[in-house]
Amino acid sequence: MRYLIALFIIVSLGFILPRLMPGDPLMNIVGEEAYYASGGALEELRADLGLDQSLPVQYGRYLGGLLSGDWGYSYLYLQPVFESVSLHLGWTLLLMLPAVLIGATLAAVLGGLAAWHRGTRMDAGLSGLFLLVYSMPHYWLAMLVLFVFSFHLGWFPLGKATSGVSGLPYLVDVGWHMLLPLVVVTLFKAAYDFLIVRGSVVSIYGEDYILMAQAKGLSSNAVLFKHALRNALAPLVTATAIQFGMIFSGTLLIEVVFSWPGMGTLIYDAIGARDYPLLQASFLIVAICVLVANFVADMLYPKLDPRTR
Amino acid sequence: MTALLRVRDLHVQFDTSHGIVRANSGVNLDVREGESVGIMGESGCGKTVLFLSLLRLQQPGRIVSGSITFDGRDITLLSEPEMESVRGRRIALVPQNHATALNPAYTVRDQLIEAIAVREDGGRLSSILGRRSSSVHSGHLEEIRTVFNDLGFSGERVLTRLLQSYPHELSGGMRQRVLIAMALLMRPRLLIADEPTTALDRATRAQSLEVLRQLNAQLTMLVVSHDLDAIRHTCKRVAVMYAGRIVEEGPADEVLTNPRHPYSRLLISAQTRKRGGPLLETFTETSDLIDVPPGCPFHRACPQMVPCCIDVEPRPHQDGQVSVACHLYREAGPC
Amino acid sequence: MSFPALIARNRAAQVGLGVLLAFVVVAVLGSAVAPHDPWQHFAPFESPSFAHPLGTNDVGQDIFSELLAGARVSLAVGALAALLAVGFGVFVGVVAGFRRGVLDNLLMGLTDIVLVIPALPLVILLAAYLGANMWNVVLVIGVVFWPSTARVVRSQVLSVRQSGYVESARALGATDAWVMRRHVLPNVLPLVLSKFVLTVAAAMLMEASLSFLGLGDPMVKSWGMMLHYAFGRGGFIQGLWWWYLPPGLCIGLCILGLTLVGFAFESGSDPRLRRALER
């Protein structure tokens, strides 16, 4: 329920901000380039977009436009905003979703092992490594990785998603281009989750059902993976939902470094051109994705923790 | 007949920031096949550490010396994988805290099937993961049904509902039955029951004790409890523990009705006395187990102390069928 | 437990504090230790040499001097934004915790909503509208980071307020202000301090991200701006790692230091956390 309220507020923000922020609302709505390019036709443009009408009417038009796919026009790409955004969103999700899943799994296994062997060198090593990854700006990590593996060693391409082949080789080509950014986003996500999982498992270790599992004759690994980690899943899912916004933001920046044709590059170019319609739409889309992720996590939670059903 | 379990001079210690806690100091215990032995004592006496040591789950405590011979093998010398095959399949535990001893994320059926899987294939990750519900043999379900019937719980529909339930959906008595069933399904040689009457209402408690008493017909048992009723109802022999040592040991009806050791007397009379009468003031704090003075550990609170109790630790002496670790029972007379 | 004691016990925090202090010293000394004026122009795209330890950028400015100057800006922006965020957060948390009722619900609802909104996209949008100016950056970052402090402060206020000694004080006639001063603030302070430190880290990262994307203040040299130019003016394509690697490394080290210190403070204010974090 509160998701609907949040959605409403986010959508409304998209309406309020251009009108609230300094500068002519018309410019804020169509972008700098369009504003200056239209020269004397400004008043016509203003009337066209209904900016001379009352606010409630404008709001109605705005909502109607959103629902029908009219999200404004981008002068940078010379096409409706909706199309630019959907195209780029696909590439971003292609990169982000596998990274989130792999990263969470990696963190679960490593975090569990670190907690289980608390105080050993394995624990110190893993914790130290992930703390380091957690602290570095992730797009810097991207630069480093790109420098070492692409520039220096030449094993991977320098950026973009493809090198222009088509057919089956296309898939392989995309995969090859995708590997490095995927690794960086995965590490980034894993670093966030590692600490959470490790903390969870450390506290689970003292639970009675862990002793019981050991008393049944289960091996140490069996107790860790079947009993301890199972109970660390619910907090991990909640954490993933909470951080989803941060992971998304991080991915955007990493995309810029790799020239990956996702939302990140879109935003980077839009900032350069002060293309406000694009920036606004990007904000809306990212916010909606985050809301959806939170919603999905809420639905998943009772399945993972039977006590909350 | 050789004992199934033979504990000799067991010393278990915990290293803490306040010093070394001697949880078990020279414990000797025999459990013969088919017997049911009770370990009685208050909190802090070391009975929990004792039974955990039998499973080698006493960490962070360390077994510093002594031997635990089970079925001919000294389990203090076994490797961890060897010990894993002893836990559950040879020595099974019915834990005290039924509310938290079952994993809240798995159904009753999953956890019982896991017990069977361990019995058949061992406790490695690969063997317990292989048993998904689709490959459960009807034979296993039959086995589970039989075990529950033996525990006095029948009724097809109720059983089906029980198996699909999660631990938090069950009552305390039901959870305890599940824990007992889980232990039985592993077909152990020795069953350890830890405080079987905790957190149960009177009626359930009585049922539970009856179940345990009957189980003794098929299993050798060790019952650890501070509750006199529980011990009396289920055990043929009793050992009374105090400050990490066994102070008195013998047939239950002897020890419980006619205790010899001054501590046993106080302990037993405290649980059987009518209103009024002296309060028992001897509970052991862990701190008492750190700097243990020489002599009898009980001497400072003992109403029958004699001079040599202060510096000479008493060895067990026979008085009929009961063995008592007290100078008052020396053949040659006290000190 | 007092803060010096918390650091003294925690090896990791000591390392963090050390790193942090090193950067603060550089920030304070600033141009006094730099070999050149960071705004002065030399030959562009020079490789590292004795005269220019990290070479020069696309307009010929000495990168090493830029790096040293950047310390002051990046740390200052981070600290100011965090101050704004935490200050506002404490205010909201205390008001919500004290007043309860409708005001509390309203404020907490607002907090929850801001928490769900993804920070960077919103900040990008606001910064784009407001214009490229360091003060705008500080403001905009402050606007997104207050909710987590508000939540934490509010729950602390609630638990203190409902505790026995506060209730008896009130029964004896103590005013809100008195309770606030004597009981609430001392309890809330350790928590606020740890939140502040962690927020500075987050704010520094956010400023760097904003500048990197091109929304930073071109009149100011921060580490993020250096990354922006290094990436956008060909430093990356040409493989001039001495230009784009050092600023990011500095940001990372500062954040590492702040995180280690922040975690140490956090464990001090929550006994359960302390035990869980103990290695």
Image (tube, coloured by chain):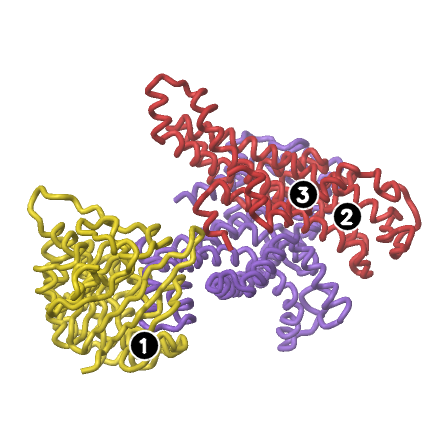
Chain colours: A purple, B yellow, C red
Q: Which mark is residue B86?
A: 1
Chain ID of residue with mark 3: C
Left or right, A79 with respect to C191, comes to right
- Residue at mark 3 shares a chain with residue at mark 2: yes
Asked if residue C126 shows in the view, the reply is yes
Within the image, what quadrant is residue A44 found in?
A: top right
Q: CA distance from mark 3 to mark 2?
A: 12 Å
In the rendered image of this protein, does residue C205 appear above or below residue B87?
above
How far across and down, in percent of the image, does residue B104 sit?
A: 31, 60
Q: Which numbered disc, 2 or 1, marks the residue closer to the eye?
A: 1
Q: Which residue is mark 3?
A: C207
The residue drawn where x is 68% and y is 44% is: C20
C201, B121: nearer the viewer = B121
User: Label 1: few (<14), some or many (≥20) within 10 Å?
Assistant: many
Label 2 SS: helix
- Looking at numbered disc 3 in the image, what kind of residue is underneath it? Glu
Q: Which mark is residue A226?
A: none
User: Label 3: few (<14), some or many (≥20) within 10 Å?
Assistant: many
Q: Which residue is mark 2?
A: C226
B57, A24: nearer the viewer = B57
Asked if residue A98 shows in the view, the reply is no
The residue drawn where x is 36% and y is 31% is: C163
- Looking at numbered disc 2 in the image, what kind of residue is underneath it? Met
Left or right, A176 with respect to B184, comes to right
Q: Are marks 3 and 2 in contact (CB under 8 Å)?
A: no
Label 1 SS: helix
How far across and down, in percent of the image, does residue C216 sit?
A: 72, 41
C273, A288: nearer the viewer = C273
The residue drawn where x is 84% and y is 53% is: C54
Within the image, what quadrant is residue B235 found in?
A: bottom left
- Looking at numbered disc 1 in the image, what kind of residue is underneath it? Val
